[in-house]
Amino acid sequence: MQLLPWNHQQIREHLQEKAKHNPFLLHQHSTNRETLLEDVLPNWYTPTATEPSLQEHLRGQITASTFSFQQREALLYLTQWLSPSGYLEESPQVWAVESSWSMSELEAVVPHLQSLDPPGVGARSLQECLLLQLQSQPHSLATLLVRDYLEDIANCVRHSTESKQNQQLLLEKLQQNRLPSPVNLQALKAAIQEIQSLEPRPARNFSYQPATIVTPDLKVKPNGNGWQVSLAYEVSQEFCLDEEAIASLTQNHYSAKKTRELESLLEQARNLVKALNQWQENLLKVGEFLVNRQQAFLTSKDSVDLVPTPQQLVAQSVGLSDATVSRIVRERYLLIGGKQSRIIPLRSLCTPVTVGGRTPRQIQQMIIQLIEQEPPTQPYSDDQLAQLLQLRFGIAIARRTVVKYRKMSLINSSHKRKLIDTLRSKETEILKT
């Protein structure tokens, strides 16, 4: 049970430490004594406690949240794209590459990320960062200034004659725009001070933890009949029982107390080796089942080809408990070999079953496909989409479920799609004339 949630590196480190104190556990590849901390530092040295990283701070909030499992997993993945200042870097296209999520799925959870502490985290720009911190007062002068006059504010913050002149110019701009309530110079200065009190770098008080470097525990490579899975690293080849030490236990006459101590260490070593072999056997067993089931996905790399494979099905098929399978796939990674190698989370192959025995991603793709084929002037309503999913794909689906997956794909309603098409047609006519 202790080894189950660990990857091969953690297990290797654990066994290395055990081998230092157990004469019956042989570390076969150990050649040089490792340098210990006490060898190079004086005994009075006390390392300074480091600040928690932003990712650790967010992880605690995400895991304790009421978001769905898929949303939590996507949020944890997105935290890897946060800059040292707390801003989301790169684009959704970059986020989605080499991940098990689509662009729309990742974009959909960005507002959830931005709702977490510290205020402003997950913003894509300075303006968005400040607006996130002002979202509780959407009609305030400070919000208006950040939204529409951010560049003007930058010229008003210094204590100089020029800054005072810029403040007066900005005030005149505001007065010309007929705001809901009149604005004077004192109110403008107070709003600018409020904006200056906001935090432009939300992650200022956290240490920075870059994107985690992962190493695979399993690897697959193409062969003539599909894909073949194997362990990426066999820890069992590095650790074994020391037969010479076991022989010396029976040949030498130790005291009764010493014999009991050695026998206890021998039992621990045997249990560790047995647990290690069981860990590798279970990991390979689960990996083989998932790889055999997801052959089409491994070839196409397209999540649409994922076959619904809930963890309960994996557990029943390989003869393990649901909890054991959950521990095995969690924080494990699979290296897909071939012309373009990539590493994916092993749990991404455990896709849940939704409507009609399809995955959520497959339902989204079907809806997108239908909408791409619809007449622009007569877009399909959600009721019509539900009927078409039944007729073309044999999926009995409720209208509200169609709405859910359409929104997840960031697709407008039929009314808005028709309105957009009408506006585009008018623009085309104007350009022609």
Image (spheres, rainbow, N blue to C red):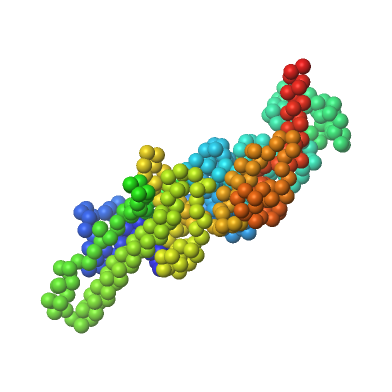
Name the residue furthest left: 251
One can see residue 249 in this view? yes
Judge left or right: residue 218 versus residue 61: left
Q: Residue at x 74, y 19 (%)?
A: 431
Residue 368, picture quadrant:
top right
Residue 194 vs residue 54, the one in the foreground? 54
Q: Picture coordinates of residue 114 (x, y %)?
A: 63, 46
Q: Picture coordinates of residue 32 (x, y %)?
A: 21, 53
Residue 153 vertical position relative to residue 206 in the rendered view, above or below: above
Q: Picture coordinates of residue 22 (x, y %)?
A: 25, 67
One can see residue 75 in this view? no
Judge left or right: residue 287 versus residue 145: left
Q: Residue at x 61, y 53 (%)?
A: 394
Q: Residue at x 14, y 72 (%)?
A: 248
Residue 267 vertical position relative to residue 367 in the rendered view, above or below: below
Name the residue furthest top: 433
Name the residue furthest front: 391
Query: Which quadrant holds the N terminus?
Result: bottom left
Q: Picture coordinates of residue 125 (x, y %)?
A: 62, 36
Judge left or right: residue 118 versus residue 316: right
Residue 415 vertical position relative to residue 279 in the rendered view, above or below: above
Q: Residue at x 60, y 46 (%)?
A: 366
